[in-house]
């Protein structure tokens, strides 16, 4: 059953079209604390349109059964829907279907890779996997800007293998210091892991540049596409990264599913992380042979309904057109950055107004703790994120422990951003600071 | 009163800016203990020291350093004002009452006779996400007072 849409395909987004889009998200129509909800926390998790909810429900109503495990008609239909979802995601991010591995979320995707590399370092996977082995003297490089999901798995892998973890620092604004990157990435670098769009700074990374530094020294690259895949056109083949991770719940899809992208040559060579049913060919009492990638990495019963729902979310985004999504959010991001900059005592993190930024902005308000900022805004129906946003090293580098973040998506309007800015201007006076 | 005013009583706003007890005091030979508490969800942090009187039966002073929201900073400040001179038994009873009030989801009317300025935190109990902020320094004080008493026993 193909979904129907209220908006014409590929139209640039306008306030009128966004009002139509909002009809697909009934959750947004509610009141919170006596005010209309303005949901400005899509960077943490996005909302699901009716089309996505219907797709998941329809799957359960008509096709639910075990995939890759049966010969009956429903099992075949479910398997087809599951693999169709994989093709849909692959097409959306410039990948081939065998390069997509389903995971629970982006965090698990990074862990899948780091554990697989750890296993390779211990000799699992034989000679084919040996080139991926890490040991003392090898360096893993990430950045100070990362989400913890792209830091801690590398810390653990370094601890397991004896490799060293190094960081590309950030500037005073919280931006990747590209000049420093040049000196950090060197002959010992084996892996370079970095985010595409910062979930705090809102900056968009110069992927081509970092990939070129890694290529020069033969290092593998991992791109954290959690905050880019939902918001801008993504072509992983063109970006030429070796691996990438993303989560469905940040792009109009359900929780519980994410993906690891890996170039076919790597996924073919690397050993599995989780093992068990579904990922094997022949099993004896002493050993097992693995299926080819990506099945090798998908042990146990898979998240079939979530995959189906995620594919519907992707079709929804495709229908809008990612260039249009990006343009709309760029406008909201600029409105946020410029407005925050105007507020006495506010320190904007990330690119200055007028410079390229995604549709989000985080800031520190002098004298008022983010928790109090968030509470004040919540009382007026504004949902924003406060805290360290799973990026403690970045906050520490900026000399703060926490910040407040407003993040937008296709269903947010300039009027909502205005409301946010108006309320934000009242926060410091409320807590006793005269501008 | 709006929800916000129930939470941010004037006493709380004042204490969050004019803070009592901020800056760790030197025990100068008296029995003392220091406890560190951290709230991983928001990064609020406190390092709090309890110094006992020379007979080791009551609280001489509470001092602390920390970083956090207005609720957590005000709670530390109020406690620093209230505790000096209290017997260890009364001090523990005060902490128990405060905890009970905060966990009551707005059900317990505070007894201002007993809780004094700490009664201002009654509104916090309706904001479940903020209870931990108010408790942070009080938990640190509870731990530190027990440790100081044990060490001196
Ligand atoms: C940049 C970035 N990376 C990784 C993650 C982790 O995503 P998940 O929690 O879905 O695994 C997030 C989400 O907060 C993120 O914003």
Image (cartoon, coloured by chain):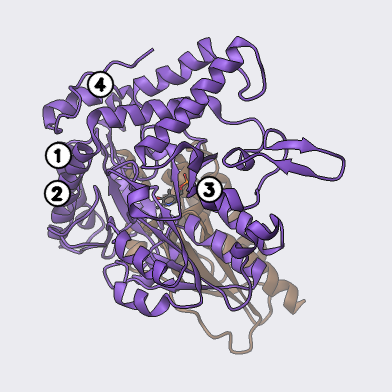
Q: Colour of chain A?
A: purple
Alpha-carbon distance for marks 3 and 2? Answer: 34 Å
Alpha-carbon distance for marks 4 and 2? Answer: 24 Å
Q: Which residue is drawn at 55% across and 47% down?
A: A108
Say which chain tag 3 marks: A
Percent position (x, y) of residue B153? 77, 76
Label 1 crowd bin: few (<14), some (14–19), many (20+), radius 10 Å: some
Dot label at residue B106: none
Q: Name the residue under label 3.
A: A109
Do callouts 1 and 2 point to residues on the same chain?
Answer: yes
**Viewed as shown, does residue A356 lie left or right of A95?**
left
Alpha-carbon distance for marks 4 and 3? Answer: 33 Å
Q: Are marks 1 and 2 in contact (CB under 8 Å)?
A: yes
Return the disc, 3 or 2, that comes first in the chain's sequence. 3
Name the foreground residue: A233 vs B143. A233
Q: Name the residue under label 2.
A: A335
Alpha-carbon distance for marks 1 and 2? Answer: 8 Å
Return the disc, 1 or 4, that comes first in the chain's sequence. 4
Say which chain tag 2 marks: A
Q: Which residue is drawn at 63% across and 25% down?
A: A68
């Amino acid at each position: 059953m193909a979904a129907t849409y209220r908006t014409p395909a590929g139209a640039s987004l306008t306030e009128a079209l966004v009002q139509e889009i909002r009809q697909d998200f009934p959750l947004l129509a509610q009141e919170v604390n006596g005010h209309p909800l303005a949901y400005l926390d899509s960077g943490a998790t996005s909302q699901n349109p009716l089309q996505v909810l219907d797709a998941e429900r329809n799957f359960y109503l008509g096709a639910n059964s075990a995939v890759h495990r049966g010969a009956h008609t429903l099992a075949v239909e479910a398997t087809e829907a599951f693999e169709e979802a994989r093709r849909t995601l692959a097409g959306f991010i410039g990948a081939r279907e065998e390069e997509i591995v389903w995971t629970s979320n982006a965090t698990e995707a990074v862990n899948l890779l780091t554990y697989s590399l750890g296993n390779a370092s211990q000799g699992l996977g034989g000679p084919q996997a040996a080139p991926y082995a890490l040991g003392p003297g090898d360096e893993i490089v990430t950045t100070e800007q990362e989400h913890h999901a792209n830091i801690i798995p590398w810390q653990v892998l370094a601890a397991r293998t004896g490799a060293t973890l190094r960081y590309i620092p950030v500037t005073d604004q919280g931006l990747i210091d590209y000049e420093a990157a040049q000196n950090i990435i060197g002959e010992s670098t084996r892996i370079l892991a970095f985010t595409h769009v910062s979930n705090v700074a809102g900056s968009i990374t110069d992927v081509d540049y970092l990939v070129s530094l890694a290529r020069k020294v033969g290092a593998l690259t991992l791109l954290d596409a959690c905050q880019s895949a939902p918001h801008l056109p993504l072509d992983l083949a063109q970006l030429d990264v070796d691996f990438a991770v993303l989560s469905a719940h940040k792009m109009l899809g359900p929780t519980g599913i994410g993906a690891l992208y890996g170039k076919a040559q790597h996924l073919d060579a690397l050993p599995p992380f989780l093992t068990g049913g579904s990922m094997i060919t022949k099993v004896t009492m002493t050993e097992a042979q693995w299926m080819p990638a990506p099945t090798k990495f998908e042990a146990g019963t898979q998240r079939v309904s979530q995959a189906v729902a995620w594919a519907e979310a992707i079709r929804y985004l495709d229908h809008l057109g990612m260039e249009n999504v990006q343009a709309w959010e760029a406008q909201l991001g600029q409105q946020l950055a410029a407005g925050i900059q105007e507020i006495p005592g506010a320190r904007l993190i990330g690119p200055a107004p007028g410079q390229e930024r995604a549709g989000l902005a985080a800031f520190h308000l002098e004298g008022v703790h983010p928790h109090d900022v968030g509470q004040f805004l919540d009382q007026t129906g504004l949902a924003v994120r406060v805290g360290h946003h799973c990026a403690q090293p970045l906050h520490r580098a900026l000399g703060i422990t926490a910040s407040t973040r407003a993040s937008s998506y296709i269903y947010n309007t300039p009027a909502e951003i205005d409301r946010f800015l108006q309320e934000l201007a009242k926060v410091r006076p409320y807590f006793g600071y005269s501008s | 009163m709006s929800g916000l005013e129930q939470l941010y009583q004037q006493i709380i706003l004042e204490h969050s800016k004019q803070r009592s007890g901020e800056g760790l005091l030197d025990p100068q030979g008296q029995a003392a203990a220091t406890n560190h508490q951290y709230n991983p969800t928001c990064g609020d942090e406190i390092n709090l020291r309890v110094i006992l009187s020379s007979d080791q039966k009551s609280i001489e002073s509470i001092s602390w350093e920390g970083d956090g929201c207005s609720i957590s900073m005000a709670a530390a400040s109020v406690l620093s004002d209230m505790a000096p001179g209290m017997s260890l038994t009364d001090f523990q009873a005060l902490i128990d009452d405060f905890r009970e009030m905060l966990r009551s989801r707005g059900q317990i009317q505070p007894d201002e006779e007993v809780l004094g300025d700490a009664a201002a935190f009654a509104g916090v109990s309706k904001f479940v996400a903020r209870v931990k902020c108010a408790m942070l320094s009080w938990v640190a004080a509870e731990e530190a007072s027990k440790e100081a008493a044990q060490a001196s026993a």
